[in-house]
Image (cartoon, grey):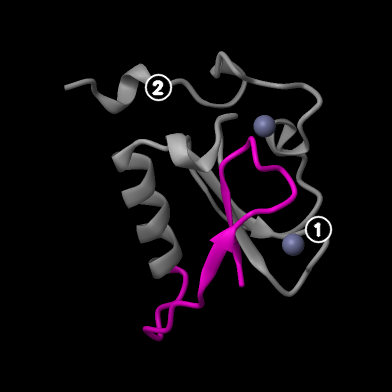
Amino acid sequence: MSGAGTIRYGREDPNYDENCPLCRMEKKTEWFYEDYMMVICRCETHPDKWMVVLKRHIPIGEMSPEEMRRTTTALINMHPDGTLVQMRRGEKYREHAHLHEA
Ligand SMILES: [Zn+2]
Ligand SMILES: [Zn+2]
C-alpha cells in the first residue's frame, strides 16, 4: 500500500501547470479551509458557491480513495447544521480535480 506521503501537492506536483488557475491557487476569493491537500474557497464566477479544490493537477476520476475521503469529510465539516448541499464536478477546469456546490 502506498502511503499518502508518496503523492506530491502544489508546486511539488509533477503535473503542476503554471497556466492552470487552480494550480496557481491565487487567493482571489474568501478561503474557508486549507491544508496541504486541498482548499475550500468561494468560486470566483459564482461567489455564492463554495468549491473544494485538490492541490494537484489531475482529473477528478484519478483522485485517490484517501483524497476522496478527506475532501468529502472537509465538506461535511463546513456544514455543522447537518445539511450537506449537493456538490457537482467542476465544469470549467476538468483536468484539475475540484467539486463545486450545485
Ligand atoms: Zn491545475
Ligand atoms: Zn462557479
Q: Is residue 67 left or right of residue 21?
A: left
Asked which quadrant contains residue 10, the reply is top right
Percent position of residue 15, x then y = 60, 18
Please name the predominant secondary structure of the magenta segment in the image. Answer: loop
Q: Is residue 21 left or right of residue 9?
A: right
34 and 44: which is toward the camera: 44
Q: Is mark 2 within 8 Å of ligand 1?
A: no
Say which amino acid is labelled 1: Glu
Q: Is residue 66 above or below residue 32?
A: above
Percent position of residue 30, x then y = 72, 60
Percent position of residue 85, x then y = 51, 77
Number of on-image labels: 2
Q: Residue at x 62, y 37 (%)?
A: 96
Q: Is residue 67 above or below residue 72?
A: above
Q: Is mark 1 within 8 Å of ligand 2?
A: yes
Q: Tell me the quadrant of the picture where the C terminus can be found.
A: bottom right
Q: Residue at x 56, y 42 (%)?
A: 97
32 and 50: which is toward the camera: 50
Q: Which residue is mark 2?
A: 7
Percent position of residue 4, x then y = 30, 27
Pointers 2 and 1 in contact (C-beta within 8 Å): no
Tell me if residue 34 is in the magenta stretch: no
Q: Which residues are magenta?
A: 78-102
Ligand 1 resides in the quarter of the picture at: top right
Say which amino acid is labelled 2: Ile
Asked which quadrant contains residue 65, the reply is top left
Tell me if residue 97 is in the magenta stretch: yes
Q: Which residue is mark 1?
A: 44
